[in-house]
Amino acid sequence: MGGSLLKEKAKAFAKELGIEFSASEGWLTNFNKRNRILTKKMCEESSSVAINVCSKWQNSLSDLIKEYELPLITIDKAWRAVTPLTIHSCFKKSGFPSPNLVDVDDTLTEFNAEPSLWAALP
């Protein structure tokens, strides 16, 4: 996507939202910096490709995708094979405290004691 197309899209969004907006080169530069968008040249020259090469590639890609599709039933079976021990081990490794080490009532009391947390809620 080029800069001119991005600026046109930004103008269209601003118009839809009823915002007065000018997509200048400075705006585009800052937008690209904020969003870490880089523009780089990928190749020096382009050349044409034979149509039959493209259709062969599309057909082989389609076959390749079909080969790796997982039926929903397989995913469901895999999830059902996950044991509570596996989940517990994952939680332990990620640093979550064990449920028997946390007093839920104390945690709620600590949370309720912090009024700024409630004030931040919409």
Image: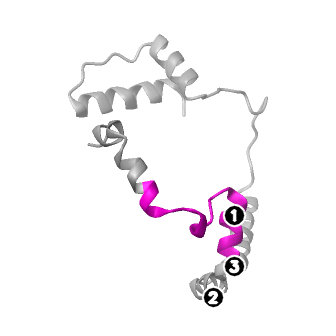
Q: Residue 91: x percent and y percent?
A: 65, 64
What element does badge 1 sit on? helix
Tell me the mark number nearer the camera, choosing from 2 and 1. 1
- Disc number for residue 85: 3
Mark 1: which amino acid? Answer: Lys
**Residue 70 seen in render:** no
For disc 1, the marked residue is 92
- State how far apart marks 3 and 2 are (Cα): 17 Å
Mark 3: which amino acid? Answer: Leu
- State how far apart marks 3 and 1 are (Cα): 10 Å
* Residue 50 to residue 57: above or below: above
Q: Residue 57: x percent and y percent?
A: 74, 64
Say which residue appears at 30% left-offset and 43% top-offset.
118
How crowded is the residue under tag 3: few (<14 C-alpha within 10 Å), some, or many (20+)? Answer: few
* Residue 37 to residue 95: above or below: above
In this rendering, would 45 be left or right of 110?
right
What element does badge 2 sit on? helix
- Disc number for residue 77: 2
How crowded is the residue under tag 1: few (<14 C-alpha within 10 Å), some, or many (20+)? Answer: few
How crowded is the residue under tag 2: few (<14 C-alpha within 10 Å), some, or many (20+)? Answer: few
Q: Which numbered disc flags the more N-terminal residue, 2 or 1?
A: 2
Q: Which numbered disc flags the more N-terminal residue, 3 or 2?
A: 2
Q: Is residue 96 magenta?
A: yes
